[in-house]
Image (cartoon, rainbow, N blue to C red):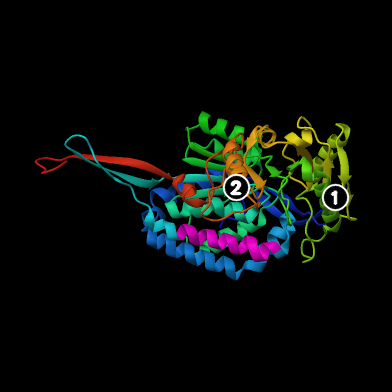
Amino acid sequence: MQKYYLSGKTFETVDPRSGEVIASVAEGDKEDVDLAVKAARHAFDNGPWPRLSGFARGRIMMKYADLIEEHNEELAALDTVDAGKLFSLGKTMDIPNVANVLRYYAGAADKIHGQVLKMSSELQGYTLQEPVGVVGHIIPWNFPSTLFFAKVAPALAAGCTMVVKPAEQTPLSALYYAYLAKQAGIPDGVINVINGYGPTAGAAISSHMDIDKVSFTGSTEVGRKVMQAAAMSNLKRVSLELGGKSPLLIFDDADGEICVASSRVYVQEGIYDEFVKKLAEKAKQWVVGDPFDPNTRQGPQVDKQQFDKILSYIEHGKREGATLLIGGKPTGEKGYYIQPTIFTDVKEDMLIAKDEIFGPVMSLMKFKTMDEAIKSANNTRYGLAAGIITKNLDVANTVSRSIRAGIIWINCYFGFDNDCPYGGYKMSGFGKDLGLDALHKYLQVKSVVTPIYNSPWL
């Protein structure tokens, strides 16, 4: 693994618990991206990985998953110090889940096949599913490990080689995953991790003439730039998982505990007042603090820039006339901690209701009828996900089919699974992570046709 980039530059990665520097990381620039792509191209065109049987690729991927599990605590700790993610969840959920994502696609690697075609004339035809080639993966900071493997695992199974650019805020675990890939027996050049900034390294990946596909997760604004660069270069294939402002619709018949993870919550008027009261009580009990503390429910924001952005949105909410029910301020003596913040009396044209904030800020709104709830849920440029809380099956069916979003959770939220595709409608992008849909975006179909003579049947 090349540790020093041609650019000769470095950047600091910061611990959001304290604002202190953890380490200096080599900063890749355009020339470094060229070098990484050259390695990936050589590995694809001449190396063993695309030419191994799917079974052989799957065996190596299984070993990779085992190594990740063996280093569970180190990897979880890296994402905690780098991104402020809860260590307890990283250790019990995030890192075990990425190992299982690898195993899921390892099991699919030897089940990639085309079809025999029933041609209408004296021709014999079949299709092949071939790896798309060299892939550029651009990863955000909110789920550094989960999204690394949501992209890398299916691309590996398909037989692709790749260049991965983690977010500049969270470079550390990706470097460890590159090291473990080598230990697992993944050949040189197959996974190339290059750290750097979006306008330099990310732009170089998006516009590179020798990258065949780019997969990006991040903001809609940057996604538009990625797509434009892909079109202006070699028309590389693009998949985008972009911003969201996912609604949660809670109907009058909802009962029991509701774990609210949505930033845009619509509550039916019959239970609205009681819901607000219970939510405020819950928020007061919410422990914000050191993500290594097992009692903590919310850690720091990823960096100073995101911290300031969230606080500015809170000020917008106040200025636009929303009622601050609870929170709204920084907390702690150091680091990038913000109180859980809930606004009521929110109008749909307010910034806090329209923009993706990526912070502990919730907007509460009231609705009367199911039709009104559907209209409000769809009143957004995004379409990533939505949640419905109801005991009425007819309501659940109607609303889930009426909301234009890529995934609908009924009586749950954040119900992710390796077999369940995840990706958006509208300005939340296109293309799926997870499930077999994700595998197919790293494959391309080739039709093979030959004439047949004197066959007893066509």
Q: Position of residue 318 (x, y in %)?
A: 88, 36
Residue for badge 1:
277
Q: What amino acid is at disc 1?
A: Lys
Magenta span? 89-106
Residue drawn at x 63%, y 45% as measured from the top left? 7
Tag 2 or tag 1, which sits nearer the N-term? 1
Residue 354 among magenta residues: no
Q: Nearer the viewer, residue 219 or 364?
A: 364
Q: Please tell me how crowded label 2 is: few (under 14), some (14-19), or many (20+) other residues with Cα within 10 Å.
A: few
Q: Position of residue 327 (x, y in %)?
A: 87, 48
What secondary structure is found at the residue carrying circle 1? helix
Quadrant where the image shows the C terminus:
top left
Q: Residue 344: percent from the left, percent from the top?
A: 83, 40
Give the percent coordinates (x, y) of residue 80.
Answer: 72, 59
Examine the residues drawn in magenta and state their main secondary structure. helix
Q: Is residue 63 above or below residue 371?
A: below
Q: Nearer the viewer, residue 317 or 75?
A: 317
Residue topped by disc 2: 393
Q: Please, which residue is most extreme toward the left here?
A: 454
Question: Residue, x 61% and y 36% (percent of image)?
Answer: 223
The answer to whether residue 12 is above or below residue 186 is: above
Corner quadrant of residue 225: top right
Q: Seen in the image, is 416 located left or right of residue 188?
A: right
Q: Quadrant of residue 111?
A: bottom left
Name the secondary structure under disc 2. Answer: helix
Residue drawn 80% across and 40% down?
Answer: 309
Q: Is residue 409 visible?
A: yes
How many other residues sit within 10 Å of disc 1, few (<14), some (14-19) or many (≥20)?
few
Residue occupying the far bottom of the picture: 70
Measured in 3D between alpha carbons, the distance from the residue under mark 1 to the one under mark 2, in whole angstroms, is 27 Å
Looking at the picture, tell me which residue is in the foreground, 311 or 200: 311
